[in-house]
Image (tube, rainbow, N blue to C red):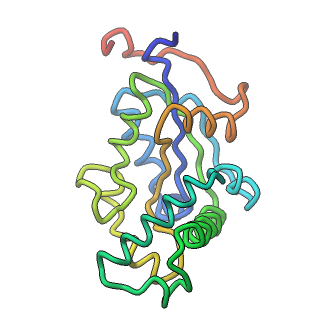
């Protein structure tokens, strides 16, 4: 069994985060938390790469559609009129295509992060995937105001600056997808003996 200090996760600074000059801020917040950057690279993703990054299973796509429908209902908008359907699968596929367009709209930075509870710690640092609901002090809460309602009505993905793996299974898939073994490094930070 792996030591908790060895837990790894993936962070992607999305095109809007790169274009807004927030790469250093993202890295700084991760490192200040005591987590280690063990892999780092700027790159331009192809549609095929982003397609491989996001799940294709029906459950995940349906969840995207259901979240979109819920958002439409809570604000009194007509999903059928605006999106042409009320079927969660159809809407989920549409939203997934918006994600692919968004993630290929400019360069991104991929970051492999390691440390105690790296997955949950990074999720706390980045904040809610819905920037308008993200707490102040998080990356999304401090630097983005986008919202699903605006994004859906504009027929685009939510501009939320960063991606962070949600769980161990997702982190493992995404790290293996975006990094080769020789691009992830093992080293000891100077303060590790003091911190833990």
Q: Residue furthest bottom?
A: 81
Residue shown at 44% from the left, 70% from the top: 68
Residue shown at 59% from the left, 49% from the top: 109
Left or right: residue 52 compared with residue 1: right
In the displayed structure, 128 sits above or below 114; it is below
Q: Nearer the viewer, residue 112 or 88?
A: 88
Residue shown at 54% from the left, 57% from the top: 14
Res. 95 image quadrant: bottom right
Q: Position of residue 183 (x, y in %)?
A: 69, 30
How many numbered discs, if any? 0
Q: Nearer the viewer, residue 28 or 173?
A: 173
Left or right: residue 39 compared with residue 138: right
Q: Position of residue 114 (x, y in %)?
A: 49, 26
Residue shown at 38% from the left, 77% from the top: 72
Quadrant showing the C terminus = top left
Res. 85 image quadrant: bottom right
In the displayed structure, 25 sits above or below 150; it is above
Q: Residue furthest left?
A: 136
Q: Position of residue 2 (x, y in %)?
A: 51, 13
In the displayed structure, 180 sits above or below 61; it is above
Q: Position of residue 24 (x, y in %)?
A: 45, 47
């Amino acid at each position: 069994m792996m030591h908790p200090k060895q837990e790894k996760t993936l962070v992607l600074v999305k095109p809007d985060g790169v274009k807004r000059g927030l790469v250093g801020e993202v890295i700084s917040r991760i490192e200040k938390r005591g987590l280690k950057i063990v892999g780092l690279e700027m790159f331009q993703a192809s549609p095929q790469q982003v397609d491989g990054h996001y799940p294709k299973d029906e459950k995940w796509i349906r969840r995207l559609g259901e979240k979109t429908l819920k958002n439409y209902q809570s604000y009194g908008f007509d999903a059928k009129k605006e999106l042409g359907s009320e079927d969660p699968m159809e809407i989920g596929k549409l939203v997934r295509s918006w994600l692919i367009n968004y993630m290929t709209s400019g360069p991104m930075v991929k970051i492999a992060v390691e440390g105690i509870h790296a997955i949950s710690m990074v999720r706390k640092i980045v904040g809610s995937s819905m920037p308008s609901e993200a707490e102040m002090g998080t990356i999304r809460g401090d630097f983005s105001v986008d919202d699903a309602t605006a994004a859906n009505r504009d027929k685009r993905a939510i501009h939320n600056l960063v991606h962070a793996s949600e769980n161990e299974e997702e982190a493992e898939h995404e790290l293996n997808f975006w990094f080769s073994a020789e691009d992830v490094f093992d080293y000891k930070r100077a303060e590790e003996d003091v911190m833990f």
